[in-house]
Amino acid sequence: MNTDSSRSPFYTAQELRDFGFSAVGTQVRISRKASLYEISGTIGNHVRVDDFCILKGRLEIGSHVHICGFCSVSGVCGMVRLGDFSTLANRVSVYTGSDDYRADALSSSTVPADCVVTITGDVTLARAALIGAHSVILPGTVVGEAAAIGALCLVRGAIPPGTIAVTRDGGLCFKGTRDVEKILRLAEDVLSRDQTVPTP
């Protein structure tokens, strides 16, 4: 346990580059209690990653992104792109690779590759997408701008911009829409403020 009270609870920009990020923005707060493995990619400005998250593989993290506690984001079998202002609530899991549960095959990272069948695909959360607690994002998913996915959802495929989706009767159910243009205007406003505020 770290007993040096003067040490920051967040990784430094250099430490994040040492993990494998090629670019790290300003005001990045990634908890030292988060675990990072085989990282490549970039991080924008004003990014927060809370305690006990697991980040793996190829990640492009935009600006003003928040990954709440206990999330797992795996870019091992593809790229995970988290657009500006996207948010993952507690315990969200994002996968670019998944065992094919229909296959007559083994399912473990400890067995030879020719004994498993894996479904792979990039995952993209567009600007201002919001993913609710305990949701699972499967390979190949694209969540459109300002879409909101409720808690406990299983998400695969394309979610249109502004969609509000929840789980009902074991499936994903669309319950309405958000004002995409208004949300994106707010995002642009915040980004413009960033350019006028000096960073310490």
Image (spheres, grey):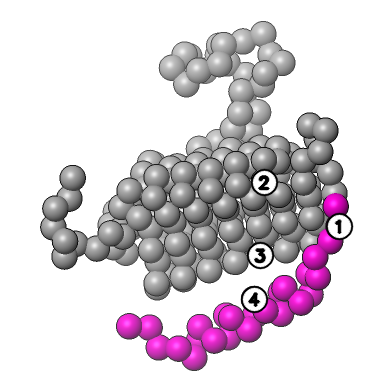
Q: Secondary structure at mark 2?
A: loop
Question: Which residue lies under the disc numbered 1?
Answer: 176
Residue 161 point in image, percent of width and height: 79, 60
Residue 159 against residue 171 in the figure, above or below: below
How many other residues sit within 10 Å of disc 1, few (<14), some (14-19) or many (≥20)? few
Residue 74 point in image, percent of width and height: 51, 40
> Residue type at mark 3?
Ala
Between discs 2 and 4, the one toward the N terminus: 2
Q: Tell me if residue 78 can be seen.
A: no
Question: Which of labels 2 and 4 is toward the front?
Answer: 2
| Left or right of residue 110: residue 101 | right
> Residue at image x 16%, y 61%?
5
> Residue type at mark 1?
Gly
Question: Which of labels 3 and 2 is toward the front?
Answer: 2
Question: Which residue lies under the disc numbered 3?
Answer: 128
Q: Are marks 4 and 3 in contact (CB under 8 Å)?
A: yes
Residue 168 point in image, percent of width and height: 81, 38
Query: Mark number for residue 193?
Result: none
Cα distance, mark 2 to mark 1? 15 Å
Q: Which residues are magenta?
A: 175-200
Query: Mark number for residue 151?
Result: 2
